[in-house]
Image (cartoon, rainbow, N blue to C red):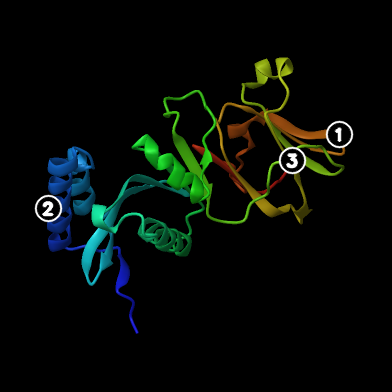
Amino acid sequence: MRTKFQINILPTQLNLKKIEEWLIEEEKNYNEGFYCNWTIIAKAFKNGALITFDFDEMPIGFLVWSRGEIHAEIDVLEIKPDFRNKGIGEFFFKQFSDYLKKNKFLVIKLFCAPKESKKFWKKMGFIKFPHRGFSEAKLTYFKPLINIQRKSKNRQPGHLIEIWNVEPHLKNNYSPKWTWNIKLNNDVLILPIIHPCNSNWNMRWSKNGETIKEDKVKYFDIEENRVDYSPFIYIEKLIE
């Protein structure tokens, strides 16, 4: 039997009208909500970047999103006021995550707005974005959609990836900001690395203390193997 709750990747003009009605009412009654972003929402609908979460074929939630090369970015997400605090937002997000995985996205990025939403996104497993030297807001977060290699606190024998959050000419004044002990199988990482990064930061690949390659992140890109997918690195293979 079909569930009454459904993610809708192709909302209709009627769905859009219903969303507008509740946003207007929410702003009128509570002086909050996303009606102030209506131009963005309507444009997203026109461009196929609006997804709704429907109950009995009527929208009770929606999100606006955009596509990167390996990541999806959530620009707006809202649940209709009378459906909040019932687990609907969590269910909607899970359905959207499953949709992204099926479409080969590897990671989600978002900005917590309003800032009170930070609690919800942290509950969903989102991690705070590090400062990359760009104009990203402080409440920017991300979440990988696949199993990844976790950062290491201690060096271990074998292959090591280290990243400094400065350019190579400054790295001698600092310790590596992030370290991953990795295992390779024919040049392929058993678990890949996904992490926010500045393409000009210094990265080092070593084995048992001997440097194999060290340069700016963007110079690790070669024809056979790309690493820099700004604003993230995605390392699934290492080739000398």
Percent from the top left, x then y, of residue 12?
17, 63
Mark 2: give few (<14), some (14-19) or many (20+) Cα within 10 Å: few
**Whole-Å distance between the Cαs marked 2 and 3?**
49 Å
Quadrant of the drawing holding the C terminus: top right
Q: Is residue 47 visible?
A: no
Element type where label 2 sits in the image: helix
Q: Residue at x 45, y 35 (%)?
A: 140
Image spot of residue 68 (x, y percent): 42, 46
Q: CA distance from mark 1 to mark 3?
A: 16 Å
With respect to residue 175, does 15 lie above or below?
below
Q: Residues within 10 Å of mark 3 (few under 14, many from 20)?
A: some
Image x and y of residue 204, in percent? 72, 32
| Residue 86's disc number | none
Residue beneath the point at 22% across and 70% down: 57
The answer to whether the residue labelled 1 contacts the one labelled 3, judged by CB atoms less than 8 Å apart, is: no
Q: Residue shown at 13%/60% (left/top)? A: 13
Residue with the mark numbered 2: 21
Secondary structure of the residue carrying tag 1 is loop
Q: Earlier in the sequence, mark 1 or mark 3?
A: 3
Three-letter code, disc 2:
Glu
Residue 152 has which mark?
3
Q: According to the image, label 1 marks what residue?
A: 209
Residue type marked 3: Ser
Query: What amino acid type is highlighted by mark number 1?
Result: Gly
